[in-house]
Amino acid sequence: MLKVAIGTQNPAKVHAIQKAFQEQYGEVLFQCLKTDSNVSEQPLSDQETIEGALNRAKNVLKATESDVGIGLEGGVSESLYGMFVCNWGALVDRDGNEIIGGGARIPLPNEIIRGLKAGKELGPLMDEYAKRTEIRKKEGAIGVLTNDLVTRKEMFRHVVGLLIGQWQYKQNNL
């Protein structure tokens, strides 16, 4: 049976990982640990967000006897077109494979951008903006800003699918 270590206890991320792996492998043994990303609480670039996901995957794999470690990290990235929500995932296995994949991006409202540039985190800013609580553990900024047509769980499920697919391809073709 495949053993998967999950580098978070955030319900939206855990659900996405469990769903994706169960769809591919049926019975899977999961272990969820609060794991350090070793990046800032609010990653402000793709590079920092990727590093956070990779660090979570590596750290949770080291802390367990699992076959695979998974790290998911949400952040923001800036371009000439504004500041966007970004999401990255990493899969690390016992053979030393490190796989990354990224998710959807949408622009953030100016009110949120101002708060981020003032040093605040996206989660609390979104709670205040949407007048809700614990958005990061539920629909996420993506859910709020897409009128729940795309939720954080679905977006991260897509990212985990990208990770699993690349991992399977490597196992079967390299």
Image: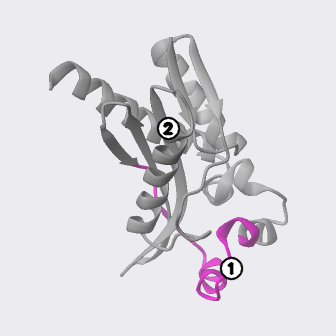
Q: Is residue 111 magenta?
A: yes
**Mark 1 highlights which residue?**
120
User: Residues at badges 2 and 1 in contact (C-beta under 8 Å)?
Assistant: no
**Residue 120 or residue 6, whichever sits in front:** 6
* Quarter where residue 114 is shown: bottom right
Q: Is residue 151 in sight in this rendering? A: no
Q: Could you tell me which secondary element the residue under label 2 belongs to?
A: helix
Residues drawn in magenta = 102-125
* Residue at (45% x, 30% y) in the render: 68
- On residue 61, the disc is 2
Judged from this view, the residue extending furthest toward the left is 174
Mark 2: few/some/many CA within 10 Å (<14, 14-19, 20+): many
* Residue at (44% x, 71% y) in the render: 45
Residue 48 rendering spot, x and y as whole percentages: 44, 67
Asked if residue 100 is positioned above or below residue 164 in the image, the reply reads below
**Residue 110 or residue 171, whichever sits in front:** 171
- Residue 70 shown left or right of residue 92 in the figure: right
Asked if residue 95 is positioned above or below residue 49 in the image, the reply reads above
- On residue 141, the disc is none
Residue 133 rendering spot, x and y as whole percentages: 84, 59
User: Which amino acid type corresponds to the residue marked 1 in the rendered image?
Assistant: Lys
Q: Quadrant of the C terminus?
A: top left
Of the residues under marks 2 and 1, which one precedes in the sequence?
A: 2
Q: Calculate the distance from the C-alpha at mark 2 to the C-alpha at mark 1.
A: 30 Å
